[in-house]
Amino acid sequence: MVTFPGNLKPETEEEVYAHYRKVIDSTSLPILLYGRGVPSLRRFHPSGIPVNVFDRLADHPNVVGMKMTHAMPAGLAYELCERLSDRILMGPVNLDLVPILGQHYKNIQWSSQWISDSVQSPDRPYGVELFDLVRKGRMQEAMKVYWQMLPLIDLIYEIQARLLGADEPHPWQHMKYYQWVMGGNGGLLPLGNNESVPVLTSESRQRIRDTCKKVGITADRADEEFMVGRTAYARGVRASELTAKPHYV
């Protein structure tokens, strides 16, 4: 995924385009454009996303999609889809937008990793079902799935989205906890002493568990398993053996 450095202050859109092209042309890997507003680019678009530049880049054979970040307003999502969705896959992180955008644009087929980890488990693949039904135009069925998963979508706003800022670290331990509750391995991330990373509290963990239980996803396992990871826990590793518990209370 390619974005624009916040410390650069280009004078023209051509400079912005040249930066992206330099990165894109340096690899044969598929490229995702990162739809995150950059303050220094607001001279080119009020959102800070260089829409005109992205429109040109969408013609590049390496560019396959765009991540539409979580706090993106509906108007901006509409404008980006109007400009780009005929050529690349659009990935709305805000799942409330999926039924609306999917009705009008054919390339609404995916969302980003941390969101997909927060709204589904292998036994309850709500996110996959929602996108699949929207893609097939089966909107009544899609809305049934949407309403089933809405408590999880709301929880993302309540716990995670409010912690996300343009220049702030993501709530990494919260994301990891979601993965574990949904059936992943878990394990605390070695985040160091970055004080701005949100702390995963017992209240947040219980709120995540309770909401998941409402929609049929239950993790009847001890948080200690999350702390060390399921695989290590099965081998007998315990939390008392950890040398640090970063951003975890």
Image: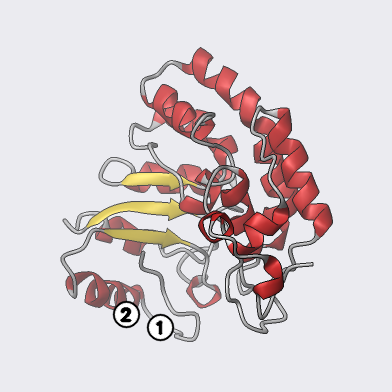
Q: Which quarter of the figure has residue 20?
A: bottom left
**Foreground residue among 132 and 36:** 132
Of 68 and 201, nearer the camera is: 201
Rendered position, 110 above or below 236: above
Q: Nearer the viewer, residue 17 or 172?
A: 172
x and y percentages locating residue 158 in the rendered image: 75, 49
User: Can residue 171 be seen?
Assistant: no
Crowding around mark 1 (Cα neighbors within 10 Å: few <14, some 14 to 19, many 20+) is few
Residue beneath the point at 53% across and 37% down:
121
Asked which colour scheme the image uses, the reply is: secondary structure
Q: Is residue 122 visible?
A: yes
What x and y, as percent, mark residue 140? 52, 13
The residue at the point 66 percent across, 80 percent down is 243
Residue indicated by mark 2: 15
Q: How many marks?
A: 2
Q: Residues within 10 Å of mark 2 (few under 14, many from 20)?
A: few
Residue drawn 72% across the image and 33% down it: 213
Query: In the picture shown, does residue 176 fall above or below 139?
Result: below
Quadrant placement of the C terminus? bottom right
Find the residue positioned furthest to the right: 203
**Quarter that holds the N terminus:** bottom left
- Residue in front for this viewpoint, 220 or 57: 220
Q: Say what amino acid the circle numbered 1 marks.
A: Glu
Q: CA distance from mark 1 to mark 2?
A: 7 Å
Residue 12 x %, y %: 36, 78
* Amino acid of disc 2: Glu
Residue 11: numbered disc: 1
Tag 1 near tag 2, CB within 8 Å: yes
Question: Residue drawn at (66%, 65%), measured in percent from left and top?
Answer: 238
Q: Is residue 153 above or below residue 162?
A: above
| The disc label shown at residue 149, or none | none
Task: Find numbered disc 1 in the image and state the secondary structure of the residue it sits on.
Answer: loop
